[in-house]
């Protein structure tokens, strides 16, 4: 874990959201898990793209930007193969980039209904 990840998850979250917006990701929400029991991280950031190409582009942009600007890499990535749901694990923040249909099917936000959910854009 990097000091940037450990000391400033809020700043890292804002940077990730900016990266998603730069690639025209939609339905951006941030879920604050700090007050929930047994959470796997501090925040989830969830968004979707219109195609597997866009989903991959959003995820790759986040990875590239954080690597270049902050010298951090995700601890784990998953889902690039079919790009229905790409997960980027930055320890304190886990990013989920979906295709819209997949997001609607899994309804990840509903699984954390007891957490604070902040909508970062209104295109859902």
Image (cartoon, rainbow, N blue to C red):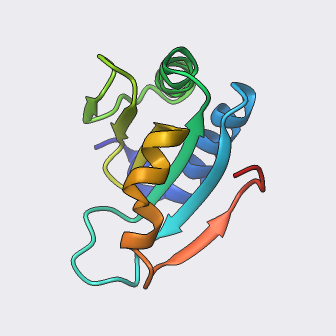
**Of 10 and 20, which appears nearest the observer?**
20
Residue 96 visible in the picture? no
In this picture, residue 90 sits left or right of residue 4: left
| Farthest-out residue, right | 122
Q: Residue at x 57, y 39 (%)?
A: 48
Q: Please determine whether, in this image, residue 39 is positioned above or below residue 14.
A: below
Residue 12: x percent and y percent? 55, 47
Residue 71 visible in the picture? yes
Residue 41: x percent and y percent? 32, 62
Q: Please determine whether, in this image, residue 64 is positioned above or below residue 73.
A: above
In this picture, residue 21 sits left or right of residue 54: right
Residue 49: which quarter of the image?
Answer: top right
In this picture, residue 7 sits left or right of residue 27: left
Q: Please determine whether, in this image, residue 24 is positioned above or below residue 68.
A: below
Residue 16: which quarter of the image?
Answer: top right
Q: Residue at x 27, y 30 (%)?
A: 78
Q: How many numbered discs sit on the rendered protein?
A: 0
Residue 55: x percent and y percent? 51, 25
Q: Residue at x 44, y 57 (%)?
A: 44
Q: Residue at x 61, y 28 (%)?
A: 50
Residue 1: x percent and y percent? 28, 43
Q: Please determine whether, in this image, residue 114 is positioned above or below residue 73.
A: below
**Of 111 and 90, which appears nearest the observer?**
111
């Amino acid at each position: 874990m990097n000091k940037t990840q450990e000391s400033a998850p809020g700043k890292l979250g804002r940077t990730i959201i900016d990266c998603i917006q730069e690639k025209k990701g939609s339905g951006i929400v941030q879920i604050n898990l700090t007050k929930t029991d047994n959470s796997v991280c501090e925040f989830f950031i969830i968004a979707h793209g219109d195609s597997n190409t866009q989903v991959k582009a959003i995820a790759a942009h986040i990875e590239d930007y954080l690597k270049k600007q902050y010298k951090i890499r995700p601890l784990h990535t998953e889902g690039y193969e079919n790009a229905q749901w790409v997960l980027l694990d930055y320890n304190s923040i886990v990013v989920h980039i979906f295709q819209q249909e997949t997001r609607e099917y899994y309804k990840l936000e509903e699984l954390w209904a007891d957490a604070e959910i902040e909508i970062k854009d209104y295109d859902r």
